Image (tube, grey):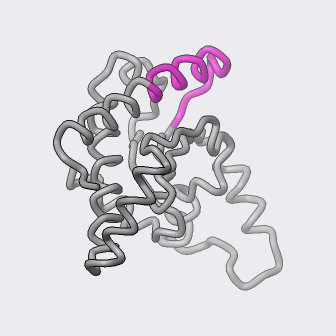
Amino acid sequence: MILNDEVIKNIKNDIISFAITETEKFLTQKSGEIFYAFAFDLNAAYGEINLCFNTEEHFQKTLKYYQNQSNSYSYHSNEEIKSLKYNTGDWEYQCFSTIYPIDETFLEQLYQTSYEDGSYSHVLTKIIQIFSESLTLFKQTETYKKIPKTEDFIAFTIDHDEDVEDALMRIEEY
């Protein structure tokens, strides 16, 4: 099983349609809120995309909570604060909607083939690339333009357990 141009195009179209529909619904429910970030939170190994938003107000509450904890990792350095700010697992609206745009049977066949020829990491990288390119296409839609944004708003993809810095660097690629 291969990810040819037609298959990739269909996957991207499904993701963009989903993102438009679900973001429109979300924005209707959360009117009046202003967001500093939007993310495709991925679990690429399972072909999963979760849509996520966060507000500056919620981030400040989360930061204050962690800074008031007695543990040693209290989010005081700029790097720690940035890591928390873009960690979708701590966002107010994490995973408000989920899609699996790659059919499970197709995904299993892709992985079976990639394990046999040793290209598993290449397939995983390709899936992340397809999902990231889909976000870039979504950013060109009217729905994306309607998102109430802070001046420093960003949209990015981040894979399960990926370092925030690595995910943010990928913004430059797509």
The part of the image, by quadrant, that contains residue 172 is bottom left
Provide residue 6's location: percent of width, then percent of height.
20, 36
Provide residue 83's location: percent of width, then percent of height.
52, 66
The part of the image, by quadrant, that contains residue 65 is bottom right
Left or right, 63 with reference to 38: right
Query: Seen from this angle, which residue lies furthest bottom?
Result: 72
Question: What residue appears at the point 42 percent right and 18 percent down from the top-left corner?
Answer: 146
Question: What residue appears at the point 80 percent right and 68 percent down from the top-left corner?
Answer: 68
Answer above or below: position of 7 versus 75.
above
Question: What residue appears at the point 53 percent right and 39 percent down from the top-left corner?
Answer: 99
Magenta-colored span: 18-35
The part of the image, by quadrant, that contains residue 73 is bottom right
Answer above or below: position of 64 versus 51.
below
Answer above or below: position of 26 versus 110.
above
For this rendering, which residue is in front, 111 or 62? Answer: 111
Provide residue 84's location: percent of width, then percent of height.
58, 62
Looking at the magenta stretch, what is its main secondary structure?
A: helix
For this rendering, which residue is in front, 149 or 21? Answer: 21
Left or right, 148 with reference to 68: left
Counting every numbered tag in the picture gives 0
The quarter in which the N terminus is drawn is bottom left
Answer above or below: position of 105 versus 93.
below
For this rendering, which residue is in front, 73 or 26? Answer: 26
**Is 127 included in the stretch rendered in magenta?**
no
Question: What residue appears at the point 46 percent right and 71 percent down from the top-left corner?
Answer: 163
Provide residue 86's location: percent of width, then percent of height.
51, 56
